[in-house]
Amino acid sequence: MSRRDDLIARVIAGYRQAYGEDPAQLYAAPGRVNLIGEHVDYNDGLVLPCAIDRETIVALGDGPEARVEVTALDMGDGARDSFALDAPIARGGEEWANHVRGVAHFLQERGYPLRGARMAAAGDVPIGAGLSSSASFGVAAALSLSHHAGHAVPASQLALIAQAAENHFAGCACGIMDQMASAASAAGSALLLDCRTLETRSVPVHPGLAITVIDSGIRRSLVTSAFNQRRAECEAAARHYGVASLRDLTVDALNAGRGDLDDVLFARARHVVAEIARVAPMADALAAGDTAALAGVLTEGHRSLAEDFAVSLPALDRIAALVGTALGASGGVRLTGAGFGGCLVAVSDADAGDAIADAVARYNAEAATPARTYRFSPGSGAAPIAFG
Ligand code: GLA
């Protein structure tokens, strides 16, 4: 059985066990890996993620009138929630349940009335690895509940609704990148996204390139990490410069207006300004298959995240150094996602797989937690799955 068939079988079996009948429909929403543009989405910047071939699958069917019943198959026995649609939907219970509650609340608030539904969800995006398991869960929930109620919600709306749920119900001040990547990606391409306007352009990945995720195995929780603090630091720096967001700063303005801004906030702002400027060259290099240019952009991106934004760890720096040296001009590697653990991403010549594997083996020989690599072709965004 393929990976997806396996997951579908698990979700259908879980639905049957929970509700004693078959689901009516299946939906999928992928996780993502970000190629460049890290910690810039909440500064209105540009980002370049792509969907991965790991996803959340939701099975859905009719439920009691004006009620949603949810079973989260990956969250242990008895991970169930139930809430009414015809009364205010409040936060409550586990974090996973709040994603669904939040999505239902914001769908209805934004003009998409829902109908009663039963839902079972499972996924194979590793949790806490920086590959957006929560965004894929939130987007899958938003797509399934809205589709079931007869609405064709545009991808950017689904993303905004899933983000609002994460911000206001799950307590993470995340930006819009992950949900947009999950909702709007096109197969074989990365998604160039302007986080201020939500304008998108698909950037085809040159066929001579491979994208490899290197999972450090070190897990973190976004909500409890310093993520919200980093966002607050960026907002404080933007206030110092008198701009709506750091997107509005040029390198010249950054230096000229420094004044009495302290070193930490200055470094955060410097990362954001430089990182936004790396996105267009990265998109060009990705489409052209220019590995030397990719190597330069990715190496600089990692350095900036580690030194100026301070979201790396010694173990992640070590993997980046080993893989970066092994690749030379045949590709680059950097930390991807929020940081403090999780994954790195390498974009390289398609035949550089052995060089990456050897470098990771060298790292594993000295590391407490082994890292693992996996290669994938960028997938497409959230969609119903033909079924039955
Ligand atoms: C997390 C957040 C995103 C983004 C990245 C860092 O994945 O959910 O919105 O801020 O971190 O680029």
Image (spheres, rainbow, N blue to C red):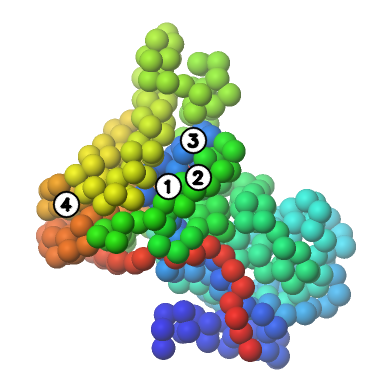
Look at the image and tell me in which quarter the N terminus lies. bottom left
Q: Is mark 4 within 8 Å of ligand 1?
A: no
- 127 or 377: which is nearer to us? 377
SS at circle 1: loop
Q: Amino acid at mark 1?
A: Leu
Q: Is residue 282 above or below residue 247?
A: below
| Location of mark 3 (residue) | 45
Within 10 Å of disc 2 (Cα), the crowding (few <14, some 14-19, many 20+) is: many
Residue at mark 1 to residue at mark 2: CA–CA distance: 6 Å
The spot of residue 151 in percent (x, y) is: 76, 64
Looking at the rendered structure, the kind of residue marked 3 is Gly
Q: Which of the two discs, 4 and 2, labels the residue nearer the N terminus? A: 2
Callouts 1 and 2 close, C-beta under 8 Å: yes
Seen at 41% across and 84% down, the residue is 2
Query: In the rendered image, which residue does mark 1 sit on?
Result: 48
* Residue 330's disc number: 4
